Amino acid sequence: MATYGDVPFTLTDICDFEQAFLPSSSVYEDATHGFPTDPIKDIRTECMNGRHNRWIKKEEISDVVLTAIETSKLAEVYYPAYRTIQSDNKIQANQAVIGLLFPGTGYDVDLPHDSRTHQSRARLAIQFDSGGMPYDPYTDEEPSPAIKRSREETLQQMLKAVESTFKYQHRHFLFSLYINDGYLRIIRWDRFRVIVTQPVNYLEDHETLPRLLWRFARLTDEQQGLDASVTRVELSSEDYRLMDRLGQFDPTLDISDEEGVFLPRFPARNDATQAAAASTSAQPSASGSTPRSRTAQKDDDPRVFKRVRAAFRESLAKGWPRYRMKVGPEGREFLVGMPRCQNPRLFRRGYRCYIAVDCDTHKFVWLKDAWRPQNEGGNFEGAILQSFARDSKLKVPTVVCHGLVAQYRPSAERRPSRECSAAQALKIPEKRVTRSTARENGKVIGVKRARDEDEEGVKDRSEPKEESCDAVASEPSSAHYRLALKEIGIDLSEFTSGWQLVKLIFDCIRTHARAYKEYGILHGDISDGNILICPSIIQKDGREVVVWNGMLIDWELARFVSEDGRPLKRHRLTVGLPLSWEFSSIQRHRDSRRPLTVDDDIEAFVYVLLHTAVQYVRHTLPARAAGRYIHEFFETYRRFPNNVVDCSELKVKSVMDARLAFEGTDILFCDDGRAPVHPLNGLLFELFRRLQARYTVIEWDAQADSGDDDESDDEGDSENRPTCARQRPNGKPTRGTVKRDGRAAQGLKPPTARQRDLARGLQSHLAIVKLFSKYVLEQGWPLHDKVAGNQLPADFEHTRRIVDVPDGVPLPAKARARGRNASRKRAKIAGGNR
């Protein structure tokens, strides 16, 4: 499998592709169908400039081909439309021409034409290009710089069209055609790979294009890539009207979710009133985090938080399709509109999250639709949350239902192989070497990412071999998973004061501690997006009052560990770093293959606290400096000459100095009077002092290990080494002396006993829980220290940046050891081969 930029390609023969993905019912049907060839002859005549024997422009080619498809019914009930996608450089000549096939049936007859040809209904994409094989982005011919840029733009434009189709639809894969003058490729896109056929001259073999379109038109919806567990909600349906009705504000049932608000008494209702409320505006329970069994149970309380209903109403956006979706092995159904959040990228890990309506209860739930590599390993989030089901002390979501989504697999019974015609047998080089565009920095160290990443990175050359579609299509490339949760949380940035921010994070630390102690589970992906505010209702003095608790979500990357903290082999993941690079510990950056530890997650909690406070709590940094600080501390990474990636120099310096400063200004948080006196300053100092102790111990011990390794490297040459370096005159080894001298020569100071105690405190939760508890209970927290809005500039964008480190800058200790071990392994393998 090759990659072009971030796109993994598999090259295959068009005959194998048809047998695997476009099957006909029988050889007899294929042979006797009588594909129309006159339209293809007409296309050849119209697309060639007769006087100069040159191809016309791609826009004109698209008109000719799409008109022939429609007038000759080459795709039967499917009809075409086309659109242009502007290239990033805004040059008119570089616009992509994308044709789309739409079904002629299957929707409301009164639906307007623009809705019938909306991207959400497209079934097949056809990209038109010109210039011949040199401009083909899927070929391996070495191009000139100008042609190379054109190829990259062509590929990115097609990706935009495919991503847009996946964005609006629920599908596992999508077919497309690539037509470049007289050549054609058929392509199959899914979320983890692209299968591309060899080019075929469809104007010489007149049956190729009609046959492909005819076969495609006879595929079922599932064979065309649509998710069989999802059904579109049409405008005239009862489900559509129900969603509109549930999005309406209801003053009798909608309640505030602000902390500390006493709710009005909710009168007891008779059965008739309850039935009416359930049929018109039944809503999820507001009691999200009260002690209970975490198996979702029947709840007759129809009240709903105003914020939840407003968010659902926003999801009913005009022009966005609505769907009925099945979840879990029992096929429980939910209604969804526009996702509340999603990853727009096509490849690698992805997700879409909705505020959904449970069709059984008409209550709102949080529905997560996710996919990840099939071979990644790990556990499903719902199974982990269900293991917490009866523990009311854990602030985690409640599972309504969950399960894998069945994916279409081509039949194992293939029809007999059909001989390719001479026109189809275009000569393709044995090896296809692809050139990478700027790889995203998430791939620099070989980990799978889902979030948007920078375009800086290393270039990759790969040499794919042609593969059989039978092997490629036998197993899905991704695991598609859905999870419905009872609670609908509030973003962490909605906290109202610095004290409340610390308390919310403290709630999640205690949940993390209990999950580790009682269940042997480490979360593994602590970030600001995985800490939510969960409003709940409690009884106080005989009245109902709203309280806020921190809720730790997204346990899909959790690790199971033994009592001594070692990972259990059956639960190991192939992914190294968490999805949230910004908050991962320095140690995990330097050695992502090292097993996750408690102090890694605790360090991530510290960074979440700092990251959120800098954005929303009043501090001493100048207005424009806050954005630069966030970008430099959290989103900048250093890449050493051997491609080892480490976190930013500012992050390392802040930890090793136990001091928060930027551009000559100490970062101090301010009270209501704008004085730099705030309990948060003391808490952050204590936390960074512990991180400083951790890395002082790590650096010292790593140099000791390095001394062992260096000495073992030279054992083979011991005869050539000075005796004084090997042993004392009395015969005792001097290894310890050598290590101490080496560390002293590098300016390292041994950690004090106090520092070792502080470092050990991070290896369990007790010391951190005591520290947070002390500050949460402390008096003197300001009430109005949160600023209105975000302190980052309005034009600030969260983008990752990798800075190349020049030669001569020493690697971090762990990175040096990792690089040295890799070099030894390569040398050992090379020696064995000799």
Image (tube, grey):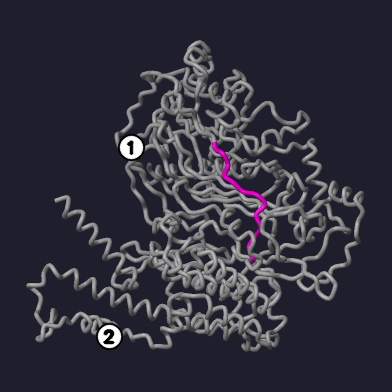
Q: Is residue 706 left or right of residue 505?
A: left
Toward which corner of the image does residue 242 lie, by quadrant? top right
> Does residue 396 belong to the magenta stretch?
yes
Depth check: give the residue in front, 237 or 281. 281
Write the residue at 54% across / 17% down.
39
> Does residue 558 belong to the magenta stretch?
no
- Determine which residue is flagged by label 1: 465
Q: Is residue 360 left or right of residue 626?
A: right
Give whichever of discs 2 and 1 has the lower sequence position. 1
Expressed as whole percent of the image width and height from the top left, the position of residue 426 reads: 35, 26
Expressed as whole percent of the image width and height from the top left, the position of residue 563 reads: 45, 68
Amino acid type at mark 2: Ala
Instruction: Determine whether 36 is above or below 766 in the image.
Output: above
**For the residue labelled by badge 2, is the local secondary structure a helix, a strand or a loop?**
helix
Q: Is residue 443 visible?
A: no
> Which span of residues is magenta-colored?
395-407
Q: Quadrant of the N terminus?
A: top left
- Determine which residue is flagged by label 2: 744
Amino acid type at mark 1: Lys
Residue extending farthest left: 719
